[in-house]
Amino acid sequence: MKRTICILLASLLCLALSAADGLRLTTVVIDPGHGGKDSGAVSRDGKDYEKTFVLDIAKTLRDKIRAAYPDVNVILTRSDDRYVTLGGRADVANKANANLFISIHINSIDKTSPNGFSVHVLGQSHKKGTDLYANNMDIVRRENSVILLEEDYSTTYGDFDPNDPESYIFMNLMQNANLEQSVRFAQLAEKHLKGGPIKNDRGVSQDPFLVLWRTAMPAVLLELGFISNATDLAALRQKNDRNKLAECVFQAFKEYKTIYEGGASSQTTVTQQQKTETAPSKTETAPAKSGGEEETVYAVQVFAVRKTMNPKAPEFMGYTPRVIKTGTLNKYFIAVGKSASEVRKKLPAIRKKYPDAFLVKIVGDTVTRVD
């Protein structure tokens, strides 16, 4: 199981923030939770469904972003009352190379008194042993248990069991890849939701939601009120209040987009942590410059992430990478060589470990994908 999950994490990391090279937030995926046979939380009188509320809020948010930013590609994981698997939701975002993933939900609990909104990013909660942690894990299990509705969930998700605490341990390998940006958006969402129709702020927390784990970009999950609470439900039933909730999230997106596009350096630098590429079975030496000219080499790109990764991290599976910093991204390469054809021959074997790896041409500090 450990190896399977490590390979999954590695493939997700390959996709991380690839669209951020141009320092533009070009694509956002909005995920209305549940749908179809999965109604999500249901009001006590049985008249209202989480899947209906979140779809309406998601569509309104989509329209607001499209109206304000016609150049931004806004994608919904579902635009009607249909069932989409958790893996399918993440796949939509990963295939679109999204810069941001926003999953929208409504909370529920057996008691009627809890109320308010909360914002969640991926991680193993540090609040273990507290009432809040216990409550959050109930939410996590409820949201993750949706996979049990999938006929082949054991094949798709391997040994992951939403009711087994050990299944959440491996999520820690992924949580830091996009954590900084996820937290930044989460804090902005919290700030703007404070002025909305759901009054009680339950804060920002790190929690192991499966849908966030499988996405390869900054991602947040919003719980916009409790359908089990009379006051929150009254607001959610009002179209005007649902519009206000969408407006709060839109204002967070607007501020985040400005920070995302304006806060990164425009300078490009090159850092060679290693001039030697080492695979588990043999060693390759990266070509050096000669005569003062930038020599052309070829390599396989496996990761593109903001954080600086330890070259001995388990995600590299025994390879010692070469890293080039481009803008805000650290790009990691293996199998560096002078011949494109020779490097290409190694690609099928590398893709068994990194399914989304691809061939690149490197000239000095310029990296170009080779199809």
Image (cartoon, rainbow, N blue to C red):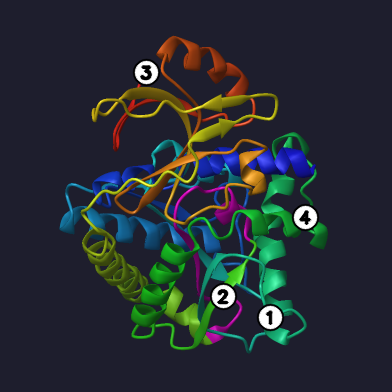
Which residue was labeled with disc 2? 205
Sequence-earlier tag: 1 or 2? 1
Residue 56, by quadrant, is bottom left
Which residue was labeled with disc 1? 127
Image quarter hosting the N terminus:
top right
Give the alpha-carbon distance from disc 2 to disc 4, as whole Å. Answer: 19 Å
Number of other residues with Cα within 10 Å of mark 3, as a class: few under 14, some 14 to 19, many 20 or more: few
Which residue was labeled with disc 4? 167
Queried whether the magenta region covers residue 220, the answer comes back as yes
Identify which residue, 9 or 229, lies in the foreground. Answer: 9
Residue 163 left/right relative to 238: right
Q: Check the image and report above or below for 15 versus 293.
A: below
Give residue 43's position: percent from left, percent from top.
60, 71
Which residue was labeled with disc 3? 371
Sequence-earlier tag: 3 or 2? 2
Q: Which residues are magenta?
A: 209-230
